[in-house]
Structures are given as C-alpha cells and as structure tokens.
Amino acid sequence: MSGSSSVAAMKKVVQQLQLEAGLHRLKVSQAAADLKQFCLQNAQHDPLLTGVSSSTNPSDPRKCRFLLVSL
C-alpha cells in the first residue's frame, strides 16, 4: 500500500469506529429482559409451545395430498 492509500484506509476505519461509538446500545441484561417479556406475552400463539390442532394442521396425513405427475 502506498502512503496515501494507507491514510485513506485509516480514515475509513476511524469513520466507521466513530459511527459505531455513536450508536445507542442496550445493556445485555435489559435486552434479555425485553426478550423474555416478549416471549412470555406471545407464548400462547407459538405453535412450537402449544402444538397444532389436527383441524388446522396442513401436514395432517388425512389432508396432505400430493399431485403425482408422470414425465
């Protein structure tokens, strides 16, 4: 690298670091508490936790039909 390209690269690094330093950051404990609260509020709508009723399950073998096409 030449001297001028090295200076330009370092200026870009400084710009990026200044940008990142100016970002608003949450503490990990606050982010975890927010995530836990969101999960608890939405748990009743999560099919992985509540399961899927057989009447609405698209993978129910009685409802699942495949179209077989011969080539």
Image (spheres, helix red, strand yellow):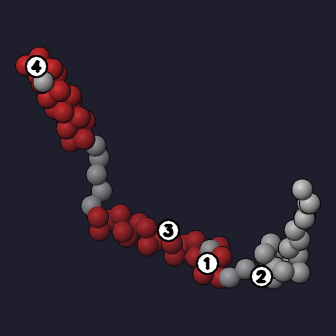
Marks 4 and 2, how far apart at CA: 67 Å
**The quadrant where residue 5 appears:** top left
Earlier residue among tags 3 and 2: 3
Residue 16 % position (x, y)? 23, 35
Question: Which one is earlier in the sequence, the residue at label 2 or at label 1?
Answer: 1
- Give the label on residue 2, or none: 4
Label 4 to label 1: alpha-carbon separation: 57 Å
Horizontally, residue 12 falls left or right of residue 24, namely left
* Image: 14 above or below 34: above
Point 51% across, 72% down: residue:
39
Looking at the rendered structure, the secondary structure element under dot 4 is loop
Q: Is residue 11 visible?
A: no
Q: Residues within 10 Å of mark 2 (few under 14, many from 20)?
A: few
Is tag 4's residue or tag 3's residue first in the polypeptide sequence? 4
Q: Nearer the viewer, residue 68 or 48?
A: 68
Amino acid, disc 3: Phe
Residue drawn 78% across the image and 75% down it: 59
- Whether label 4 touches label 1, CB < 8 Å: no
In primary-sequence order, the first of circles 4 and 2 is: 4
Report the front residue among 28 and 56. Answer: 56
Disc 2 designates what residue?
53
Residue receiving disc 1: 48
Image quarter of the C terminus: bottom right
- Residue at x 88%, y 76% (from the top left corner): 63
Q: Residues within 10 Å of mark 3 (few under 14, many from 20)?
A: few
Category of crowding for the residue at label 4, using alpha-carbon neighbours closer than 10 angstroms: few (below 14), some (14–19), many (at least 20): few
The quadrant where residue 44 appears? bottom right
Q: Nearer the viewer, mark 4 or mark 2?
A: 4
Q: Position of residue 6 (x, y in %)?
A: 12, 24
Amino acid of disc 4: Ser
Task: Say which of marks 4 and 3 sits in front.
Answer: 4
